[in-house]
Image (cartoon, helix red, strand yellow):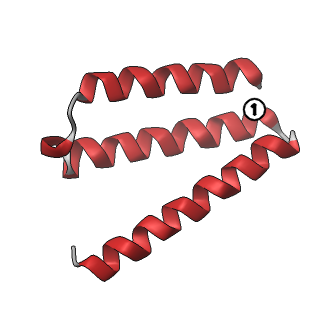
Amino acid sequence: MNANRARALTAGIGLLEMSMAAWVLSGRRPRACAAAQTALMAAFNAGALVFARDRLRSPARLLARNTGLAALAWLAA
């Protein structure tokens, strides 16, 4: 992947994360929000494990931390 494409992809991910934050703060459809957050975290984790595993310091810690975040999202929902 070239630098321009990586930059655009990173910006898109940032916009998606800001949209998710706005959804959380809105309080609308909390279970759907938690499901979307869980699905996106799973997709990002899968992408990291497939495409950048050699750059991850601790893949197990990444998965454990994101599992905890998903549990908190469902608890809040």
**Most extreme residue toward the bottom, as rendered?**
4
The answer to whether 55 appears left or right of 40 in the picture is left
Q: Residue at x 86, y 45 (%)?
A: 26
On-image quarter of the C terminus: top right
The answer to whether 20 appears left or right of 62 in the picture is right
The answer to whether 19 appears left or right of 65 in the picture is right
User: Can you give x and y, in whole percent of width and height, for residue 68 in the image?
Assistant: 51, 19
Q: Residue at x 29, y 46 (%)?
A: 48
16 is higher (above) or lower (below) than 32: below
Quadrant of residue 54 within the rendered picture: top left
Quadrant of residue 9 within the rendered picture: bottom left
User: Can you give x and y, in whole percent of width and height, for residue 20 in the image?
Assistant: 68, 50
Q: Residue at x 36, y 26 (%)?
A: 63
The amino acid marked with disc number 1 is Arg
User: Can you give x and y, in whole percent of width and height, for residue 30 in the image?
Assistant: 79, 34
What is the secondary structure assignment of the residue under circle 1? helix
In the picture of the structure, the residue carrying the numbered disc 1 is 31
21 is higher (above) or lower (below) than 58: below
User: Can you give x and y, in whole percent of width and height, for residue 8 in the image?
Assistant: 42, 76
On-image quarter of the N terminus: bottom left
Within 10 angstroms of label 1, few (less than 14), some, or many (20 or more) residues? some
Residue in front for this viewpoint, 43 or 18: 18
Q: Residue at x 82, y 43 (%)?
A: 25
